[in-house]
Amino acid sequence: MAEPEFREPEFTATGVRIERSLRSLTRAGQVKIKDGRLELLTSYGREIDSAPLGAVHASKPWFAGRDRARATVNGTRYVLTLGRLEDPSGSGETTGEAAVRLFLEAVRSGRGGDAGD
């Protein structure tokens, strides 16, 4: 019997506000999860930070808006404000709240079921 294929989680969001220590790094950045790595990029595609998913902790802060997630990458905390993103199923766009859920699920599945924080 053939072994089942496991796909790495993939996630891409554009137009993401990325903040560190109450300082906005970009208002239209990108968050990518591909090949087992998380990348935070500026609107021009320059890398802000990246790490293997095993070293990333992600959570939904209870005090923040529904479209916000927190990610700790290489020991640095970032706040991500995810707007709408293209739904990979082709059924249109996804809201910011749903984008946060998809982001957290992608990190969790890439870490083997543990999102971190």
Image: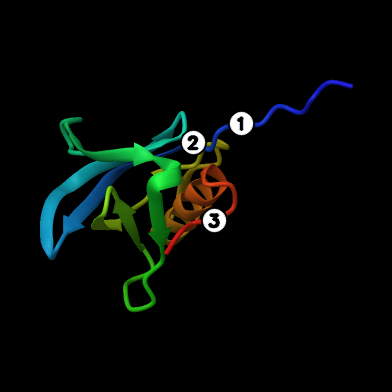
- N-terminal of the pair, mark 2 or mark 3, is 2
Q: Can residue 40 be seen here?
A: no
Q: Quadrant of the C terminus?
A: bottom left
- Residue furthest bottom in the image: 63
Question: Mark 1 = which residue?
Answer: 7
Element class at badge 1: loop
Question: In front of the other: label 3 or label 1?
Answer: 3
Mark 3: few/some/many CA within 10 Å (<14, 14-19, 20+)? some
Residue 9's x, y, as percent? Answer: 53, 38
Q: Report the amino acid beneath label 2.
A: Glu
Nearer the observer, disc 2 or disc 3?
A: 3
Q: Are marks 2 and 1 in contact (CB under 8 Å)?
A: yes
Residue 114: which numbered mark, if any? 3
**What count of labels does the image hold?**
3
Label whose residue precedes the other's in the sequence (3 or 1): 1
Quarter of the rendering containing residue 60: bottom left
Q: Position of residue 6 (x, y in %)?
A: 66, 31
In the rendered view, tell whether residue 7 sits above or below residue 111: above
